[in-house]
Image: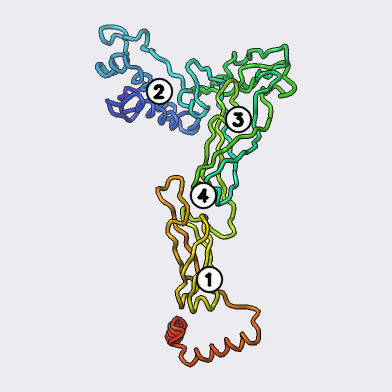
């Protein structure tokens, strides 16, 4: 094997921590593993160098000896004869599957893995009105869920029988697969990771230990919730397996469309149609709010599109210290279904306006000037 400096092999500093050493080796092993480099004859050599460096530097006693004596610490006759770690300095072996634990769900020491699993989290979309979101409410929901089987009490075995330990994995639920330098753990093909074999499964639950049910829950909606806000009900998700804790239920808020208001965070918006005469002459109009009614004074010569803001008439969000505003968008409505007399009066008004249109229709005058300038260019 090469006498290259172990720290240089792994590309780390001499004061590197244990985590840094393992991380560096993981990177080297993934890069140079022979199975990943079938056409590179030097890959296996680099892999073995990295493995040798890791086995030395990951062991505190061996690392201290290497830091003091270098490679001589592990050679026959070194340090006054023989390796301080026995014949050949083999010391600590390394299980390559440590690198891939994260890829296969982690594990426990000794190659055993827990068959206890937390239940899955659930999601429930709850539609509520704008008023309910603003003021808060309490409602009940009915959801499907997996519960412990009443017949077998979660064992999955038929009454009077019990599950037996899987002989393939010894009850661990995992088996180790070895191919050259590559060693990983995977779910047992016989028991599928359960660690037990059920010869006579319970009929109501088909051996799963769980049955599908429905349950009714009460949900408190705090004032100010908005679209996609989540309310967590701890422990109300799916039942865990083999004694695992249940998951959580997330109630996701969806606001129904409102006939008058549109919500924008804590602000509310609404369209406010007004008549042609009110826009021209002004007047008072009544508008709705979430708290009741309010009056708005429309000044004379109000144009369509103008916005009137009522402070504090919006919604106080869940995480807000104050209320939002209500924005009323003016829409001047053109009269329809006119009588002959109304048409006559409007025509008379139009004739009067035409005599001094620049004075009565300043926006139209400005727009026409821009149009003329555009065509002249």
State the separation of the CA atoms marked 1 and 4: 26 Å
The residue beneath circle 3 is: 238
Which callout, 1 or 4, points to the residue nearer the camera? 4
In front of the other: 372 or 25? 372
Q: Position of residue 279 (x, y in %)?
A: 50, 76
Secondary structure of the residue carrying numbered label 3: loop
Residue furthest to the right in view is 203
Sequence-earlier tag: 1 or 2: 2
Q: Position of residue 338 (x, y in %)?
A: 64, 81
Q: Residues within 10 Å of mark 3 (few under 14, many from 20)?
A: many
Which callout, 2 or 3, points to the residue nearer the camera? 3
The residue beneath circle 4 is: 134
Disc ID at residue 51:
2
Secondary structure of the residue carrying numbered label 2: helix
Q: Residues within 10 Å of mark 1 (few under 14, many from 20)?
A: some
Residue 152 placement: quadrant: top right
The residue beneath circle 1 is: 331
State the separation of the CA atoms marked 2 and 3: 43 Å
């Amino acid at each position: 094997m090469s006498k290259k400096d172990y720290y240089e092999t792994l590309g780390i500093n001499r004061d590197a921590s244990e985590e840094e050493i393992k991380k560096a080796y993981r990177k080297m092993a993934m890069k140079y593993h022979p199975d990943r480099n079938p056409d590179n004859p030097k890959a296996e050599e680099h892999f073995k160098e990295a493995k040798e460096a890791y086995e030395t530097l990951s062991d505190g006693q061996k690392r201290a000896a290497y830091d003091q004596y270098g490679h001589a610490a592990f050679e026959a006759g070194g340090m006054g004869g023989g390796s301080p770690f026995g014949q050949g300095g083999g010391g600590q072996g390394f299980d390559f599957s440590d690198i891939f634990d994260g890829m296969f769900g982690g594990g426990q020491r000794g190659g055993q893995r827990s068959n206890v699993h937390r239940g899955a989290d659930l999601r429930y979309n709850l539609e509520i009105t704008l008023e309910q979101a603003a003021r808060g409410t309490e409602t009940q929901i009915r959801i499907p869920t997996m519960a412990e089987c009443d017949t077998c009490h979660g064992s999955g075995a038929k009454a009077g029988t019990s599950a037996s330990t899987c002989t393939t994995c010894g009850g661990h639920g995992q088996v180790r697969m070895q191919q050259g330098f590559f060693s990983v753990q995977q779910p047992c093909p016989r028991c599928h990771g359960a660690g037990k074999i059920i010869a006579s499964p319970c009929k109501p639950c088909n051996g799963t230990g769980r049955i599908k049910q429905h349950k009714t829950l009460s949900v408190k909606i705090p004032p100010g919730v908005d679209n996609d806000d989540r309310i967590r009900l701890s422990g109300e998700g799916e039942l865990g397996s083999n004694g695992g804790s249940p998951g959580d239920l997330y109630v996701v808020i969806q606001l129904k469309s409102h006939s008058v208001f549109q919500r924008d965070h804590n602000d509310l918006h609404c369209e406010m149609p007004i008549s042609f005469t009110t826009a021209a002459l002004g007047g008072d109009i009544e508008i709705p709010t979430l708290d009741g009614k309010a009056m708005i004074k429309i000044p004379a010569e109000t144009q369509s599109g103008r916005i009137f803001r009522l402070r504090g008439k919006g919604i106080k969000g869940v995480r807000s210290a104050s209320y939002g505003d209500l924005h009323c968008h003016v829409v001047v409505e053109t009269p329809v279904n006119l009588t002959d007399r109304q048409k006559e009066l409007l025509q008379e008004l139009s004739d009067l306006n035409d005599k001094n249109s620049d004075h009565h229709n300043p926006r139209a005058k400005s727009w026409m000037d821009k149009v003329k300038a555009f065509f002249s260019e």
